[in-house]
Amino acid sequence: MRNFILFAIVAFAVAGLAPHYIDKLGPASAAPPALTAAPAVVAVPTGSGPRTMVIRRDPRGHFVVDGAIDGRRITFMVDTGASAIALTKETASRLGIHPAQRDFIGRSSTANGVIRFAPVRLGMVEIGGIIVRNVDAFVPADEGLAENLLGMSFLSRLRRFEYREGNLVIEE
């Protein structure tokens, strides 16, 4: 009798948990998702309230988003560990930013060591309709930066940003 009761308890527990895990696994016959470099952003309109965006991870596990700097399209990787927006030399050049050697006056500790950078100020940065004006940024002295980083000089001026259910949520 005791074994029967123990079996019943285990069966009820498995029956209660199984749908949750089956939903996470998805259908067995589904093909794996195609790898894409395109940013996965969903802008959620909220009427007259604050604008909210949900940013999904890319195949590498990073949060990549299309935006604009002073009206020019730019792709960023969101980096909460970066104190400011960091622009590749190529992007800075496309924006008309050409720091001279004497402009590289800043120093910053990064995961790759200490770097020199030229501080710059961006007139307007826009991500999915969320606009922040007069944003600090920098351009590193070397070519070590592979992609533009959307750092805290932008993120800290939002109402909130949070990691929720595997997505990054930002709110104006």
Image: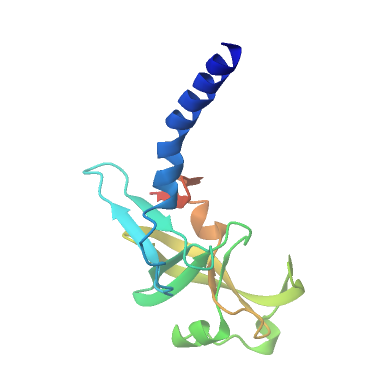
Q: Is residue 159 visible?
A: no
Which image quadrant is residue 35 in? bottom left
Estimate the x, y position of residue 158 in percent, counting from the top left: 45, 49
Left or right placement of residue 31 versus residue 117 in this view = left
Left or right placement of residue 89 versus residue 102 in this view = left
Q: Is residue 93 visible?
A: yes
Q: Work out which quarter of the rendered image holds the N terminus and state it.
A: top right
Residue name at image x 46 percent, y 63 percent: 134
Residue name at image x 47 percent, y 60 percent: 57
Left or right placement of residue 5 versus residue 54 in this view = right
Q: How many marks?
A: 0
Estimate the x, y position of residue 90 in percent, counting from the top left: 52, 87
- Relative vertical location of residue 31 with respect to residue 94 in this rendering, above or below: above
Residue ranking furthest to the front: 1
Residue name at image x 46 percent, y 42 percent: 21
Residue name at image x 73 percent, y 67 percent: 111
Which residue is at the front of the view, 146 or 89?
146
Which residue is at the front of the view, 139 or 103?
139
The coloring applied to the image is: rainbow
- Relative vertical location of residue 155 with respect to residue 144 in this rendering, above or below: above
Which residue is at the front of the view, 153 or 80?
80
Estimate the x, y position of residue 30 in percent, counting from the top left: 36, 62
Which residue is at the front of the view, 35 or 123?
35
Residue ranking furthest to the left: 47
- Relative vertical location of residue 49 with respect to residue 86 in this rendering, above or below: above
Residue ranking furthest to the top: 1
Estimate the x, y position of residue 139 in percent, counting from the top left: 60, 77
